[in-house]
Image (spheres, rainbow, N blue to C red):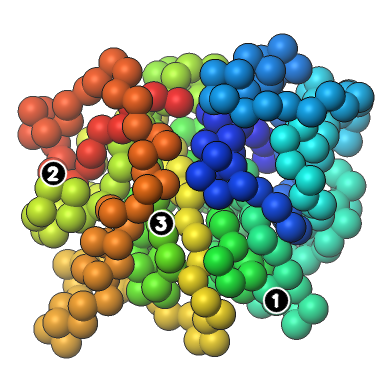
Amino acid sequence: MGISTHIFRTILKEHKFKPLKGKGLLLGRQSIFFDQYQMKNIAKQEGVKLKQISLATDTETRAGGKIVDYDLFKHFTDMNFDALDITDYEGANVIHDMNTPLPDNLFEKYDFLYNGSCMDNLFNPSQFIQNCTDLLKPNGTFLSIEHGSSFPGGYLFYSPDWFLDFFAINQFNDAQVFVADFAGFKSPHHIESPWQLWNWNPLCHGIPTEHSIHLNPSNRLILVVAEKGQSIFEIKQPVQGQYRTSEETLNPIYENSYKKFLKSNRLKYFQNHINPIDWQKSGSISNLAYIGTL
């Protein structure tokens, strides 16, 4: 699991919108795929002032790196972090199999949770995302990256509406789900190349009829920034749009959530419109709005 320059930018954008504070959780220890010079340059570009702290080399995660994951966050926030994993092989201090329900002592414990692409490597993603919801305190933030195509290989890859519909039916305060395309077919292209970013929402263009089946094949990641609402005592599982019954279609919960997400000020922090690409002209999609690059 890891944090690339793209994810670091995303974290800083979220921090500018809603300052990170309280208790944080990393799902797995995170390899940092950039050095301190890149870190400082990105922070400067994003207008985030960094603290001066001593840096240690990462000797615990499989990929290693010039920066330790906890130290990265210490540069701009006072949050205290735990790391959760199925074993302690990389130094995680919370041990749990995310294929299984959480123990009671982990419920609503964290203000911020980062998933650096665990879900494509496990067998029970529904339980995983329910666990992530339960781990968060009310109004806590979930930031996640997952593969949306078969590159670079895993048990699973995801559609954007899988995430958006879950957040919609469970009435999250906000959910921004992005499709990020990148060039190249060999690692580390998804780490080194720019990501072209689109916001996914069935109401982007006022036509709630398209689904992710209309996405063209590509090298794709699904980037999520979501904010939980109040305590959820019974997590609901969504039904995909084209299979909702008349009763479910009449239930306004999905559409009301989509509308709310589109009005979020959080989205503005991602818009830069560098090198715009118009997917609508290609005839491939109607519910993606181009945002820019990461």
Q: Which residue is drawn at 65% across and 56% down?
A: 112
Residue 241 location (% of width, % of height): 21, 67
Of the 4 image quadrants, the one containing the N terminus is top right
Q: Residue at x 52, y 77 (%)?
A: 230
> Residue flagged by tag 3: what amino acid is it?
Ala
Describe residue 121's horizontal placement relative to residue 90 as left or right: left
Q: Name the residue under label 3.
A: 175
State which quadrant residue 110 falls in: bottom right
Residue 257 location (% of width, % of height): 30, 67
* Up-down relation of residue 27 to residue 9 (above or below): below
Element under disc 2: loop
Give how far apart the Cα atoms at labels 1 and 2 are: 38 Å
> Residue flagged by tag 2: what amino acid is it?
Ser
Q: Which residue is drawn at 29% across and 47% down?
A: 200
Residue 92 or residue 265, whichever sits in front? 265
Element under disc 3: strand
Give how far apart the Cα atoms at labels 3 and 1 are: 21 Å
Residue 255 location (% of width, % of height): 21, 68
Q: Mark 1 points at which residue?
A: 107
Q: Residues within 10 Å of mark 1 (few under 14, many from 20)?
A: some
Q: Can residue 179 be seen by looking at this rendering?
A: no
Residue 205 location (% of width, % of height): 12, 47
Q: Residues within 10 Å of mark 3 (few under 14, many from 20)?
A: many
Describe residue 56's horizontal placement relative to residue 23 as left or right: right
Q: Which residue is drawn at 32% across and 18% down?
A: 274
Q: Mark 2 points at which residue?
A: 286
State which quadrant residue 129 falls in: bottom right
Element under disc 1: loop
